[in-house]
Image: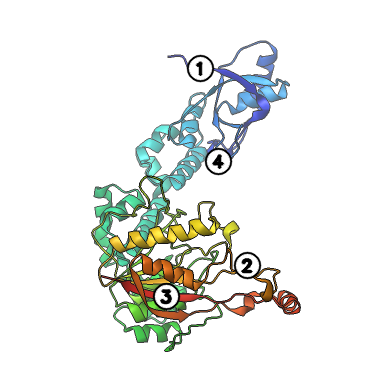
Amino acid sequence: MTPQTTQIPVSLIILDETIYPRKGIDPRRVGMFAENIRDGIAFDPIEVEPCPDRPGFYRLLDGAHRWNAYKSTGMEEVIVIIKDLDGSDPLLYAAAKAIGPKQLTEEEAKDTARRAYAQNTQLSSADIGKAVGRARRTVDGYIADLRAATQMNTDIKIFRMHSLGIPQDRMAARLGLARTSFQHHLPKMAVLPNSANADLSRGFTVAQVAEKHGWPEPMVWSLVLEGKTDHDRFKALGWGFRTWDQWEFNDCDNRFGDDWPGRIPAQLIAHILRYFSQPGDLVLDPMAGGGVTPDTCLAMGRRCWAFDMEDRPDTRPEIEPFTWEISSDQGLSWPVSAKGKPDLVLFDPPYFDKKAGEYDEKSISGLSRNDYLDFLAAFFTLLKQHVKKKTRLAFINADWRDFQNTPAMDEKHKGGILIDDYLEILNKTGWYHTHIIQAPLSSQRFTPVVVSAMQKKGILGVISRYVIVLGLNN
């Protein structure tokens, strides 16, 4: 079957060096092709594909020298074949096309092989070798160090997810590993911590060990604190323990969780874990955001299943991608079919309206007031169906008042969401509260200029935040 051709402007074609297998453009070949074009010699159409990050543009797959020759002769349009690679690696496709007229040099073949493997570690040496025109064993030599680093990275991800109690089938699916390949990694889990533990025993700090071995710091803390009591964990982490119903923390502990909109302190999560769970318990975080909960669970010896709409498989493999959406016919769906049920649910959703512009457009923060409350009602109802009779829910949220530029005397309740509204929904959906803990935000988030303006206008700001702990009405 003859490929279909079309004519497009030369100006819409770009050379994407990330998928170009050669080290550069040979000006002599371009000059020769340009001379041939002027003499009326026709060339095969160049091959392009739609540019993934520039709508309306096309990137070269084959014919970089011809394309440059067309430009040098002033041609405005050229005949092309627009390819749909249907998931095939574009770099390897371009490499395979390039070796037709002229073999890749050793340096070009090695560089292309390494770039292809770095972008897709599932590629085999045989597949890469076929594209770059080299034997499988040669490619093995090209990528040996990358493969070793990738294997260790995969092992670390598996160890991290295993420590948090994520089932094997979900780990394999999350990492894109076939079951046989996944099983190959499991025997390493018992010995993987040995070198890190050895460095810890020699007096290296947690931060030093994490940097040396490429481990996230909370994973190293999980080794240091293994078998410790919660009391001793708090002491080792430098967290003072609050024994009253007001937990105030001025700063987030940067060792736990990513920089994230609405990030909460790991100390707050740790207090909830200590009071309302036991070591080894399963914690569910349905909107995990920057990962403070799974990180803190590692340090506190708890298992954790975490979900979020933003998928970060390389940096946060333990946070499985899931978007909580209410469909018109089925309502909310549960993210997993596993039989395991959580002992504690830590629910810190994006607060209504706050930082809505910093979240994904599907975030519940951007919903209308009624839709936001309807979502919470649907979520609490669904949650009740998937937990144990003794499961505790720790719901973290804050009063929302539209105090911006409005004196306290002029504020209207209409449009606000207060703790009373949350409690009403929780009670209606079958949950009863046992504790309401104050965990205010730091007033330091208001600049002196803002505070001065608020004082002059009589504006009463909001730094309130509550941890509402609930059980089921069985």
Counting residues from the N terminus, which is met first, the one under dot 3 or under dot 4? Answer: 4
Residue 29 located left or right of residue 249: right
Which residue matches tag 1? 4
Looking at the rendered image, the disc whose residue lies closer to the viewer, 2 or 3, is 2
Determine the CA span between mark 3 and mark 4.
50 Å
Do the residues under discs 1 and 4 have CB atoms within 8 angstroms?
Answer: no
Determine the CA span between mark 2 and mark 1.
59 Å
Element at badge 4?
helix
- Answer above or below: position of 226 versus 69: below
- Answer above or below: position of 261 versus 309: below
Determine the CA span between mark 2 and mark 4.
48 Å
Please state, as top left, top right, bottom left or bottom right, where the N terminus lies in the image.
top left
Quadrant location of residue 448?
bottom right
Which residue matches tag 2? 402
Counting residues from the N terminus, which is met first, the one under dot 1 or under dot 4? Answer: 1
Q: Which mark is residue 18?
A: 4
Residue 412 in percent (x, y) is at: 63, 68
